[in-house]
Image (cartoon, grey):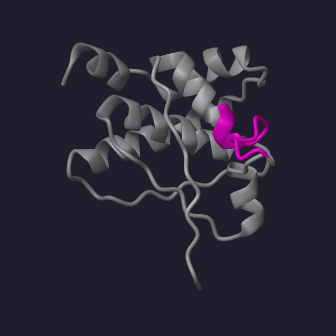
Amino acid sequence: MAFEESVMAKLIASEVLAVHGRAAGLRRNPVQGEYADYVQRGIAVARKGGYGQLMVEAETGTGKTLGYLVPAGLDCAANNSRAIVATHTLALQRQILHFDPSGHLAPECDMARALDIIKAATGKRLTAALRLGMR
């Protein structure tokens, strides 16, 4: 692992959200920070060959989406890997990821916010793509 990647691997999701989220105009939420750290620990366990599933829950409005997108993105940036986010509803999919009429990622969607936070924390610009499956 390169020096840059080892430094990124040590970034703590709640601290990244607190510092870079505030710079992006988001308010700090301690529950979101706890949630993000829990997700980050789960990803670390799975990456080391541990149990590959994680279940977390939190109240509406706590920032769950950024609470899992940011740690997943930090892991992708540190390990040059990819993550998949699957949703049950189109409404949640649109909250997370949607594009403006020109085909660019809409700045108000959660994915755009997460990618901006990850770029600010790591210097790496990750990308996102939408994939749809048939039922």
* Residue 67 left/right relative to 6: right
The x, y position of residue 102, in whole percent, is 76, 44
Task: Reply above or below: 24 against 77.
Answer: above
* Residue 130 left/right relative to 50: right
The x, y position of residue 68, in whole percent, is 55, 44
- Dividing the picture into quadrants, the one containing residue 91 is bottom right
Q: Nearer the viewer, residue 120 or 40?
A: 120
Q: Nearer the viewer, residue 7 or 37?
A: 7
Task: Reply above or below: 91 against 124.
Answer: below
Q: Residue furthest bottom?
A: 135
**Quadrant in which the C terminus is drawn:** bottom right
Residue 84 is covered by the magenta coloring: no
Q: Residue at x 69, y 50 (%)?
A: 96
The x, y position of residue 37, in whole percent, is 49, 34
Range covered by the magenta-colored residues: 102-113
Q: Residue at x 45, y 23 (%)?
A: 124
What secondary structure is the stretch in magenta mostly built from? Answer: loop
Question: Can residue 44 be seen from the camera position used here?
Answer: yes
Q: Residue at x 73, y 67 (%)?
A: 90
**Quadrant in which the N terminus is drawn:** top left
Task: Reply above or below: 52 against 44.
Answer: below
Q: Nearer the viewer, residue 36 or 77?
A: 77
* Residue 16 left/right relative to 105: left
The x, y position of residue 27, in whole percent, is 78, 24
Q: Residue at x 55, y 54 (%)?
A: 56
Question: Can residue 15 be seen from the camera position used here?
Answer: no
